[in-house]
Image: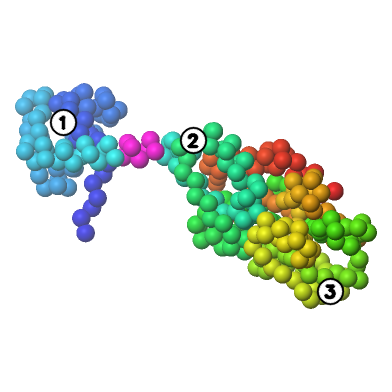
Amino acid sequence: MKRILDSRQLLAFATLARRGSFTLTAKEISLTQSAVSHTIKGLERELSARLFDRFGKKVCLTQAGEQLLVHVDRILREMEAARAGLEKLENWGHSRLRLGASPTACQYLLPTVLREFKQSFPQCVIRIEPGDGPRMVELLRDNQIDLAVMLEPARHEEIVFRRVFEDELRMIVSPLHPWAVAGRVARSEIAEATLILYNKASYTFRMVADYFARDEITLKNPIELGSMEAIKELVKLGVGVGVLAPWIAQKELAERSLVSLPLGARRLRRVWGVAHLKGRRLALAEETFAGLCESVAETLNLHEQVA
């Protein structure tokens, strides 16, 4: 297998071809004349071709040299473009941002965050992969996404989890529901109630099931859905009782089309954050995105939805 040409040899060759002088070439690329001469001889030996004719202190390209120069100029331009692209990526994030996010984050949090983000990084190409917590960890592990907006998993040795805000899961009922009228949840009725819960594969479903199992309550009639909007609509129709965080239903709670009640004596809290693979150094755009998630959570008063 033939060796790949050394970029330093190619730079010396292209500069000498343009300057026509070992002295000027040495000065431009910060080498000694003997080093330039040695570099060119090494390149000629590597290619088994004479690239320059010497006329005293002047040099001119041979036919082989002219043919090589066409390729070398293109190679050096590509190398410079690659370097410039990497510098732009490091400094200004003009590249891509591969995000993973739960459907809830996609609908309620990301639109505001990405609007702010695009003002600072207008040329950044953004791709979003929706999915629940276990899927996000899998995508991070497989390097298919850079960051994930997700709930904190119970175990996350492989990822770094940056806390953004905390919320509380509560019962959400129609204003006409007996619990809403009484102003409290009848604990003895929970097991028989139709609870409308988020996706069975999600961390949220597991948290709710574990919460009631701790109180020795087995949920007999749960309905699982993959959409918070669908859960809210079914609750409004009186089909069942939803379990979700109040910030997801701020509008409905404010207009009293839904009512929020505590799950029980103990609060069930979740932690949201931005995760990335452990050992991965974040680029400027990624750091900015994570910071914006925190500031937008403050703006939307998500931290205050715990009470």
116 is higher (above) or lower (below) than 147? above
4 is higher (above) or lower (below) than 295? below
Q: CA distance from mark 1 to mark 2?
A: 41 Å
For residue 122, the mark is 2
Disc 1 is placed on an element classified as: helix
Res 16 → quadrant:
top left
Say few, some or many: other residues with alpha carbon within 10 Å of mark 3 (under 14 / 14 to 19 / 20 or more): few
- Residue 222 appears at what percent x and percent y? 75, 71
Q: Residue at x 21, y 23 (%)?
A: 24
- Residue 119 appears at what percent x and percent y? 54, 33
N-terminal of the pair, mark 3 or mark 2, is: 2
Disc 2 is placed on an element classified as: loop
- Outermost residue, right direction? 182
Q: Is any part of residue 167 visible from this angle?
A: no
Res 230 → quadrant:
bottom right
Of badges 3 and 2, the one in the foreground is 3
Magenta part of the chain: 79-85
Q: Which residue is disc 3 drawn over?
A: 192
Q: Amino acid at mark 2?
A: Pro
Q: Residue at x 84, y 73 (%)?
A: 191
For residue 17, the mark is 1
Disc 3 is placed on an element classified as: loop
